[in-house]
Each structure stands twice: as C-alpha cells, then as structure tokens.
Amino acid sequence: MRIWSGGAVDGNRSAKLRRHSQQAHRHRFLSISASWNPPIAQRTVILRLFNFLENRRVLYVPMHFEVPDQVDQSVIQIRYELTQILNDLPENSPAARRVRHLRTASRRFLEDAPPDYRNIAYRLRNDVDHGFPIRLHNYGERPLTPGYFVALGELRAIFGLQLSALAAEFEIDVEEDLASIFPDAVERDD
C-alpha cells in the first residue's frame, strides 16, 4: 500500500478509477455532441418554405382548373410542411408568427364549412342541363359551390399577404406564379 495525497490508496485501484472516469467523460461528451444540432439560419428555413410553395398550384392556378379533392390534399401537404418549418424557426420570431398564421388558415380551410350563398342562383358547367345547383364529384369530394371558391380565395389572400411580408423581410425572390397572389403595392400620397 502507498500513501498518496494524504490518504492510503491502492495503486492498481487508482489507475482503474482514472481510466473509468476518462471513459465516462468521453461517453458523456460524445452523447452530448452527437445530439446537438446547430441552429439553421431563419432565411434558409424561409427559403425552403418558398421553394416548397412555388410548386403548390393550389395557391395560384385559375380556380376553374381546381379539383376539390386535389386541393384538399395539397392543403394538407402544405399544412404538414408549415409544421416542419415551424420546428426550425425560433418560437417567438416574426417569421414563426407568420408561418403559424398560414398553418391556421390552412386548417380553417380544411375544417370550416365554406360560406353558404343560397341567395345566389348558380349553375356550374354541365349542371345547367341536369338542373343540379352544384357540381358533385365522385369519391365524396366537396361540391364546387361559390362558397368553396370564396374559401379558396380567402386562403390564397392570406397566403399572399403573409408570404409577401416574409419575402420582403428576408429579401427572397419569388417565382412569378406564386408572386401573383401577393397584394399589389399601393403608393401613398403623403
């Protein structure tokens, strides 16, 4: 037995404790460093959102080309992507608030009943010949009514407003199709 630092310590046991301590420290360091992901710049995250949305025709093609089931599926995919984007943004950032607004608008479009315009006499495409006031599709799709198109227009307007603000804030060039839903600039006379 040797005397070391004022106490009796077995030399062999001391070496084992040091090795075990070093290995434990190395494992702790590796587990911490392996699970840490550096933050992604907000502009990169917003750019990823624009790249995704530029390929979502539900936001900008003429409404008479829309098929309700395809519109709904596209809005579901948009809502999923918005959730992924939110996971990469700081919680209280202005960008996160705008993305949350987009996600809420998407959810409302899917869940809320479209406005009802019973007082408007309308006919769509071939329905005039058959006397049906609305055009129903196969497979339980939503009917094409004026209310449906108003709800889609409202969704596009919200997206246009929020996306134009994000594009300006992060200085992002937007493809012409998607930019077509942005509000027109209004000059002020001061």
Image: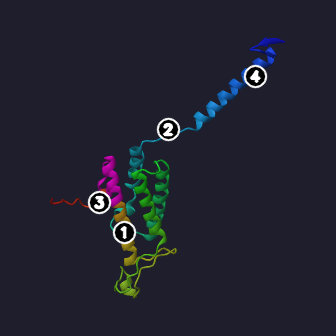
The answer to whether marks 2 and 1 mark residues whose Cβ atoms lie closer than 8 Å is no
The residue stretch that appears in magenta: 161-178
The secondary element bearing badge 1 is classed as: helix
Could you tell me the amino acid type at mark 3? Ser
Residue placed under numbered mark 3 in the picture: 180
The secondary element bearing badge 4 is classed as: helix
Q: Which is more N-terminal, label 1 or label 2? A: 2
The secondary element bearing badge 3 is classed as: loop
Which residue occupies the foreground of this view, 34 or 93?
93
Residue 186 image point, x, y percent:
21, 60
Query: Which residue appears at 41% of the width and 45% of the height?
Result: 42
Q: Which is more N-terminal, label 3 or label 4? A: 4
> Which disc is residue 154 wearing?
1
Q: In the figure, residue 24 lies in which quadrant? A: top right
Choose mark 4 or mark 3, whichever is in front.
4
Could you tell me the amino acid type at mark 4? Leu
Q: Which is more N-terminal, label 1 or label 3? A: 1
Q: CA distance from mark 3 to mark 1?
A: 14 Å
> Which disc is residue 17 wearing?
4
Could you tell me the amino acid type at mark 1? Glu
